[in-house]
Image (cartoon, rainbow, N blue to C red):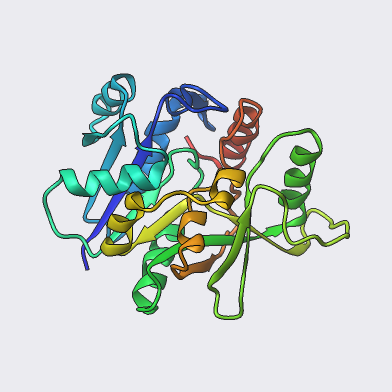
Amino acid sequence: MAVLIVIPARYASTRYPGKPLVTLRGATGEAKSLIRRSWDAACSVKGADRVVVATDDDRIADAAKEFGAEVVMTSTTCANGTERCAETLTQITGDFDIIVNLQGDAPLTPAWFIEDLVQGLRNNPQAQVATPVLRTEGRALNGLLLDRREGRVGGTTAVFGADHNALYFSKEVIPYTGKTYADTDDTPVFHHVGVYAYRPDALKAYPDWDSGPLEHLEGLEQLRFLERGVPMLCVEVAAKGRQFWELNNPEDVPKIEAMLAEMGHA
């Protein structure tokens, strides 16, 4: 089964304009752009047949081409990364059984998250879309709760049923626990990792659907699938000692840089 990884990247982010070109310093002090780190993460995935950056901005395209990325120029009217991935699929040649959307704001995404995600979709023929979820430890959950108390969104959380099909995703921290956890405690809260794997038919259908009220309220593109009754598989992934955080706000830069340094990433 051929696998395409698309990294959708836009310059005009509402919360953080120019985010793909923000530089992050790792353990060696070398500065690499967010889009470069996302590209490196995608290229380390075993079983990926092709990796492309999909953007609507020449600044991002030029930066990506400088480090050797294949770039697909997409429309400025794409409402989100999933629509950008769908448009990319219409512009490139080749038959792909699974298309992975690796959001360009998660440079700490380990390769095995994506590998496990693809395998999960392969193992579940009923699922049309799959996305990884990571059980939070107290340290991560406390960070998410602190962000919400200070009016920021640090990440998205997910709840799912016994069959691991998604029930809901929210920028609020769900489910409510009412408990305080130590940094190393496992918690019942799952952090949604900003990666998706689609079957081609589900991805092609997505741009033709109107966005629903939940998608509008939460600002979460995956809710369009749930509002249309499309099964979305939540694949639980293991951190294996790695820290995970998304770059959503300028305040996340030092947090991610500290994680890169702590994990010894250049």
Most foreground residue, 245 or 242: 245
- Which is nearer the eye, 136 or 12? 12
Q: The N terminus appears in which quarter of the rendering?
A: bottom left
Evaluate whether residue 110 shows in this view.
Answer: no
Can residue 11 be seen by looking at this rendering? yes
Residue 240 position (above or below residue 258): below
Residue at the far top: name it.
59
Total labels: the figure holds 0
Q: Residue at x 75, y 33 (%)?
A: 151
Q: Is residue 98 left or right of residue 138?
A: left
Q: Nearer the viewer, residue 8 or 134?
A: 8
Residue 109, percent across and down?
Answer: 48, 49
- Can you give x and y, in whole percent of width and height, for residue 46 in the image? 31, 59
Question: Is 35 located above or below residue 200 in the figure?
Answer: above
Q: Residue at x 38, y 71 (%)?
A: 121
Q: Position of residue 190 (x, y in %)?
A: 65, 61
**Residue, x 34% and y 49% (percent of image)?**
207
**Residue 167 in the image, given as x and y percentages of width and height:** 60, 67
Q: Quadrant of residue 241?
A: bottom right
In this view, the residue in front, 131 or 222, is 222
Which residue is located at x 37 percent, y 68 percent? 128
Judged left or right of residue 33, residue 151 is right
| Residue situated furthest right in the rendering | 179
Q: Residue furthest left?
A: 93
